[in-house]
Image: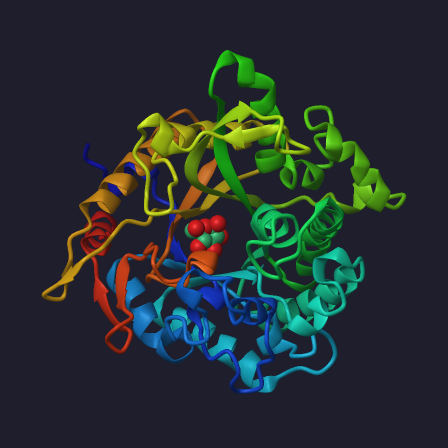
């Protein structure tokens, strides 16, 4: 299975992606206030081995080194997110000049190296001061988020043209406000309903704000996806319900289609938190949709899982190959999702804003032989070629991630990087074989 850069066409976008909380560290210096993730991860028992992102990979101090790695691997694009509490420590109001300056330095370094910056406005770390007022469950979030977006788009808009409004609203609403497994650790359907709706409103409003402030902007928002399949024919309806929850809850409102309530009955109750005119307000004409794909999910019906009445049959029970986080390696599902997104008539372009996998990497003599990851990339990139050959509008691919980093509730154990971070030894970086593989592919 040989893959050539030319198979993707001349203008194909190649980059890597990462997020502020997972990499920056520097959680309490230079005027930054705590984020929802600082508070959550510093509580005992929330994160595996009680790890936290206080230092993470110290991107805050090592961004030049990391960007040099990116450049050396022949990538041309860099996706990263802004930490809201670094820029606006109170959530709104007073600006923190040192925080603002940090992102100028990152952006300037990108430009100096010939790398195009792609900015995600929100990748899950909002100021704790706003979480104290309810965070995503408070409809005021739309105003707070608008103020933040107004500021960053004006501040960086002359240098940054590629913007993503939210990263995976599904993940932070379901994990953070329904199941309580991620920050801020809230639970229950009432919190979830509100968080979902306010995230949908912010997703579109953020798009309108960037459009107004940035000339020639390329505006997207990113979505978690998983290829959902029924375990047996008896589970088809359950799989459809899960699919509506996982793959349609944020994309369809943004396309003006409202909530997918015909497949997932409980979404009828979204009306409880909606105001007149909201369907229209959730709509925005994005230039691209960021598709993020990691694994397939096989579903069977379940009387014990309220609202969706469905549960996962994990890969291990099916004898399927899985990664360090029990995500099934299933490239065909990636193709199916590219097809599905391309089939929405109002999606103009699809960009793969995240794809990658975590395996047990071993550092030996400064080298990491991560063949499983190379195979993962080959098999998934082959699906991108297949999609492009069939005329699908897939214009770019961002690897998750440039370096290993803090994997949320799982801590540092899962490693997704093309560059290994030696957590035991001064956070030293070592390029993995997969990084060298990309370097050769992209030269
Ligand atoms: C998130 C990343 C995360 C990655 C791997 C995505 O859901 O956007 O922040 O690290 O998946 O789990």
Q: Which residue extends farthest top?
A: 233
Q: Residue at x 29, y 42 (%)?
A: 377
Seen as rendered, the residue at the extreme left is: 365
Foreground residue, 327 or 88? 327
Q: How many marks?
A: 0
Q: Is 383 or 224 nearer to us in this picture?
A: 224
Left or right position of 1 against 106: left
Residue 153 location (% of width, % of height): 63, 67
Could you tell me which residue is drawn at 39 percent across and 80 percent down?
61
Relative height, residue 308 to residue 285 (above, below): above
Q: Is residue 292 left or right of residue 85?
A: left
Q: Position of residue 185 (x, y in %)?
A: 61, 58
Is residue 330 visible in the rendered image? The answer is no
Q: Is residue 242 above or below residue 399?
A: above
Q: Residue at x 34, y 69 (%)?
A: 67
Image location (x, y in percent) of residue 374: 23, 44
Q: Quadrant of residue 418?
A: bottom left
Q: Give the image location of residue 341, x and y in percent.
A: 54, 32
Q: How is the image coloured?
A: rainbow
- Foreground of the two, 317 or 232: 317
**Which residue occupies 47% across, 58% down?**
409
Q: Is residue 436 left or right of residue 247?
A: left
Observer able to see residue 132: yes
Above/below status of 54 relative to 354: below
Q: Which quadrant, please, contains the N terminus?
A: top left
């Amino acid at each position: 299975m040989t893959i050539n850069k030319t198979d993707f066409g001349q203008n194909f976008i190649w980059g890597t992606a990462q997020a502020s909380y997972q990499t920056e560290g520097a959680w309490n210096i230079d005027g930054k206030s705590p984020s929802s993730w600082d508070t959550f991860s510093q509580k005992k028992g929330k994160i595996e081995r009680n790890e936290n992102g206080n230092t993470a990979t110290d991107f805050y101090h090592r961004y030049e080194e990391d960007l040099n790695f990116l450049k050396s691997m022949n990538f041309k694009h860099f996706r990263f997110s802004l930490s809201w509490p670094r820029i606006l420590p109170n959530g709104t109001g007073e600006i923190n000049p040192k925080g603002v300056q940090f992102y100028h330095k990152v952006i300037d370094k990108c430009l100096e190296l010939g790398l195009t910056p792609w900015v995600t406005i929100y990748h899950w770390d909002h100021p704790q001061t706003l979480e104290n007022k309810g965070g995503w469950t408070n409809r005021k979030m739309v105003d707070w988020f608008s103020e933040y977006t107004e500021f960053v788009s004006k501040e960086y808009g002359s240098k940054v043209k590629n913007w993503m409004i939210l990263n995976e609203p599904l993940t932070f609403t379901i994990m953070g406000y329904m199941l309580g497994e991620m920050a801020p650790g809230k639970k229950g359907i009432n919190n979830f309903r509100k968080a979902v709706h306010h995230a949908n409103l912010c997703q579109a409003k953020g798009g309108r704000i960037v459009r107004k402030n940035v000339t020639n902007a390329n505006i997207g928002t990113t979505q978690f996806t998983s290829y959902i399949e029924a375990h047996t024919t008896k589970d088809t309806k359950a799989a459809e319900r899960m699919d509506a929850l996982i793959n349609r809850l944020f994309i369809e409102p943004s396309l003006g289609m409202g909530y997918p309530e015909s497949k997932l009955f409980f979404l009828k109750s979204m009306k409880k938190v909606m105001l007149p005119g909201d369907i229209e307000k959730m709509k925005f004409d994005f230039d691209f949709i960021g598709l993020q794909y990691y694994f397939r999910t096989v579903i069977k019906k379940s009387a014990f899982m309220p609202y969706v009445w469905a549960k996962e049959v994990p890969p291990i029970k099916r004898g399927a190959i899985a990664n360090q986080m029990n995500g099934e390696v299933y490239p065909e599902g990636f193709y199916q999702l590219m097809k599905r997104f391309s089939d929405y008539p109002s999606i103009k372009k699809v960009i793969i804003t995240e794809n990658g996998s975590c395996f047990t990497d071993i550092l030996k003599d400064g080298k990491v032989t991560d063949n499983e990851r190379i195979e993962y990339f080959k098999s998934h990139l082959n699906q991108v070629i297949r999609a492009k050959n069939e005329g699908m509008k897939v214009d770019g691919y961002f690897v998750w991630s440039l370096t290993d980093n803090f994997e949320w509730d799982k801590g540092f154990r899962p490693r997704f990087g093309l560059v290994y971070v030696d957590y035991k030894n001064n956070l030293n970086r070592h390029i993995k074989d997969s990084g060298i593989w990309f370097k050769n592919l992209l030269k």
